[in-house]
Image: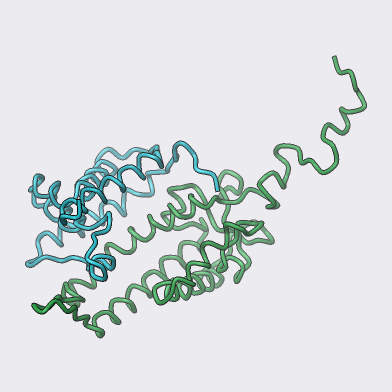
Chain colours: A cyan, B green
Amino acid sequence: VRLRAAWELDARALRTPGAVALGAAAALALLPGHAGIPCPLRTATGVPCPFCGTTTSAEDALRGHLGAAAAASPLGLLGIAVVAALVAFRPARVRVSPLALAVAVLGAWLFELHRFSFL
Amino acid sequence: MPQYPQQAHQPYPPGMVPPGAPGMYGKATGPRAGFWQRVGAAILDGLIVGVPAWIVTAILFGLKIATKRIDGTVHVDAGKLFAEVLIGSVVVLLYRALLDGGPRGQTIGKRVVGIRVVDASTGTVIGYPRGFGRAGAKLLFDLLMYACLIGLLDYLWMLWDAENQTLHDKMVNTYVVPVEAYPIQ
């Protein structure tokens, strides 16, 4: 198993799914109440996972509350921004660094652990 | 100025495989998709199918499967959970079967990372019936994985398999390969 320094991705295939995901997230933001997938890790142990808060963050971002979105999960806000950029700017190829991805997920975990007062 | 002209006919000692020949990819007989490529494709497919499917089922069945009561106990609505798992499974089965079995031999996630599914014997498309077989086998391992981590063996198998095959690849005789080595016809 060898990890490359950068992944060269074909982003054309992500335009339609990206638009569908943004539409679905917008529908979720319009629904009354708050939808959230119960995180298995947090439900079982009380400890948040790196992706806790992403649903809240996506909803808040699509309602235009960017501060609240960043406070719930920077990863969620970043995800919405990346998907919106893929749909709006229509790049054909995208380079992703696995190291940067790992750092982002680890950073998000530290953030969530701090948010739930474990750090 | 070659000092050993006789070596031009056999530039590599026996047992050593020249670059570009089958066999340079570990023990595999040809180029095979790598572990992280397939992990990345699986995560992307999970997001592409999972997010919309979850939102639709959330709208149909209500938003919360699990509710936390005041006394701290968690109540899971088994009926809702079953309905969501059932709908999710059917959607995932159709998505994988129709795309992996289709003329491109790749789901959207595989297309993004540049890999595709081919028949192990012919190196070409597997067709819809085997697409369904492959998707069904994969779904069974997925469900097993949710019940018990042994299901993970299906995916991890490619780490020590000579042809980088998962168990669901073996069950339907498929390889997952880089698109540049096996172009879409």
Image position, residue A54 (x, y; %): 21, 55
On screen, residue A62 versus residue B45, left or right, reads: left
Which residue is more in the foreground, B64 or B133? B64
Which residue is more in the foreground, A79 or B59? A79
Image position, residue A48 (x, y; %): 23, 59
Query: Furthest-bottom residue in view?
Result: B79
Give residue B66's quadrant in the image.
bottom left
Which residue is more in the foreground, B137 or A36? A36
Residue at the image point whose x is 60% and y is 49% from the top:
B182
Image position, residue B73 (x, y; %): 17, 79
Residue at the image point whose x is 24% and y is 65% from the top:
A42
On screen, residue B58 versus residue A1, left or right, reads: left
Which residue is more in the foreground, B98 or B13? B13
Image position, residue B171 (x, y; %): 60, 71
Q: Identify whether B80 is placed above or below B33.
A: below
Query: Furthest-right residue in view?
Result: B6
Residue at the image point whose x is 68% and y is 59% from the top:
B122
Query: Furthest-top residue in view?
Result: B1
Count the numbered circles shown.
0
Residue at the image point whose x is 28% and y is 62% from the top:
B51
